[in-house]
Image: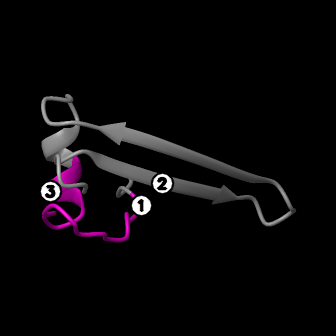
Amino acid sequence: MSADRMITVMLRAEDGQGAVGDAAFFMSPGHKDYEETIQHVGGLKPGQTKPYPAWPDE
């Protein structure tokens, strides 16, 4: 989370056969998934970096 509370989520997927996909998502306060993302990583404060675990299967 940056000082202005913007969250950057960087993801990578690999299929084990050489295919790789990278994505970056940016969320500012007010984004529909902002609070859920903070809860998902166990809380987040400006300046903090945390791993982004996989979502549980539902």
- Point out the tag, 1 or 3, that comes first from the N-terminus: 3
Q: Is residue 48 magenta?
A: yes
Quarter of the figure that contains the N terminus: bottom left
Q: Quadrant of residue 19?
A: bottom right
- Residue that label 3 marks: 39
In what element is the residue under mark 1? loop
What's the amino acid at mark 3?
Answer: Gln
Measuring 86% from the left and 63% from the top, which residue is drawn there? 17
Question: For the residue carrying disc 2, how many other residues have a C-alpha within 10 Å: few (<14), some (14-19), or many (20+)?
Answer: few
User: Which of the two marks, 1 or 2, is nearer to us in this view?
Assistant: 2
Mark 1 in CB contact with mark 2 (< 8 angstroms)? no
Magenta stretch in the rendered image? 37-54
Q: Main secondary structure of the magenta part?
A: loop
Measuring 16% from the left and 61% from the top, which residue is drawn there? 46
- Separation of disc 1 and disc 2 at Cα? 12 Å
Q: Position of residue 31 (x, y in %)?
A: 20, 29
25 with respect to 22 (left or right): left
Question: For the residue carrying disc 1, how many other residues have a C-alpha within 10 Å: few (<14), some (14-19), or many (20+)?
Answer: few
